Image: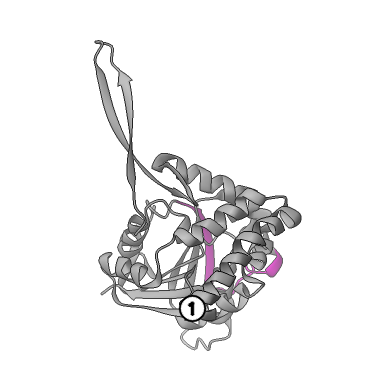
Amino acid sequence: MPKRTATMATTASNHGTTTTTTEQTTHFGYQTVKESEKQQKVREVFEQVAKSYDLMNDAMSLGIHRVWKDIFIERLGPTHGMRLLDMAGGTGDISFRYLKYLAKQPNPEQRSSHVTVSDINQEMLNVGEARARQLGLTVDQLPSVASIDWRCADAEKLPFNDDSFTAYTIAFGIRNCTHVDKVLSEAYRVLQPGGRFMCLEFSHLENEAMQWLYDQYSFQVIPPMGQLLAGQWHAYQYLVESIRRFPRQDQFKAMIEEAGFVHASYENLTFGVVSIHSGFKL
């Protein structure tokens, strides 16, 4: 789990005495920042890259992110009647795959399915809604047994009732959150008993030589590519650094279990460049 440290701030009172307050710090890539600052810094990064988000994913994964997301949905195995919360899902990549997957499944009982696409960044949601219109996946265009809505929300403080969803997905988003433990706790709260938590995230390669090669590509190629393709060196630099700061697969699995989930597991894709994590609420 990422370490947190404390910073001290001293303020003067009206009575001439001083008070000292302690504020926790956390990481923003390789920088150490106050916890109160990280969310805004992450929001600024994604405001900068929102319109080039697919380009960013292509740069960071050599285009393989589309295959990873397809596998992720296959592992989820959506069924009619499911209510999905797709957190950090602003551009709709996971939700659109979910809806298309369901459209291919027989539904003789005409069971209604739903997805709520949620993201802390409204710019990302705007991109997703525009894409939904282009793909014919808006509420007006979907069949009557499928629905989608969009909510700007903080994964650490979800505005949804307990036991609201049957599945929760978060793809390439949890590493950007300040308190991963709070995100997991909220995911557990809003899932119904029997509900499933699934996370797709960049991870750590098990082979040291391959990890070294991947690091060279990540740090030497991706930021310059971000500058050339999107005019965003520092945003891409942060995204690379945030991957290296995220817990290893077994550590994150333990965090999922600590949040209350059972049958926690993970599956490495592309030698561990990314991992699919899963857990159930009983």
Residue 138 shows up from this direction: no
Q: Which residue is painted at 50% across and 57% down in the image?
A: 242
Q: Which residue is painted at 26% across and 11% down in the image?
A: 16
Q: Position of residue 190 (x, y in %)?
A: 34, 62
- The range drawn in magenta is 134-153
When the figure is inspected, residue 178 is found, relative to residue 255, above or below; the finding is: above
Q: Amino acid at mark 1?
A: Asn
Which image quadrant for residue 137? bottom right
Which image quadrant for residue 218? bottom right
Q: Position of residue 60 (x, y in %)?
A: 62, 65
When the figure is inspected, residue 182 is found, relative to residue 60, above or below; the finding is: above
Q: Which residue is painted at 36% across and 67% down in the image?
A: 252
Which image quadrant for residue 174? bottom left
Left or right: 199 as drawn, with respect to 45: left
When the figure is inspected, residue 269 is found, relative to residue 96, above or below; the finding is: below
Whether residue 30 appears in magenta in the rendering, the answer is: no
Looking at the rendered image, the quarter that the N terminus falls into is: bottom left
- Residue with the mark numbered 1: 207
In depth, the one of 4 and 181 nearer the eye is 4
Q: Position of residue 171 (x, y in %)?
A: 50, 67
**In what element is the residue under mark 1?**
loop
Q: Which residue is painted at 34% across and 62% down in the image?
A: 184
Q: How is the image coloured?
A: one colour
In depth, the one of 167 and 223 nearer the eye is 223
Left or right: 26 as drawn, with respect to 104: left
Left or right: 122 as drawn, with respect to 232: left
List the single residue furthest toward the right: 228
Left or right: 253 as drawn, with respect to 221: left
Looking at the rendered image, the quarter that the C terminus falls into is: bottom left
Q: Residues within 10 Å of mark 1 (few under 14, many from 20)?
A: few
Residue 26 shows up from this direction: yes
Q: Position of residue 136 (x, y in %)?
A: 67, 69
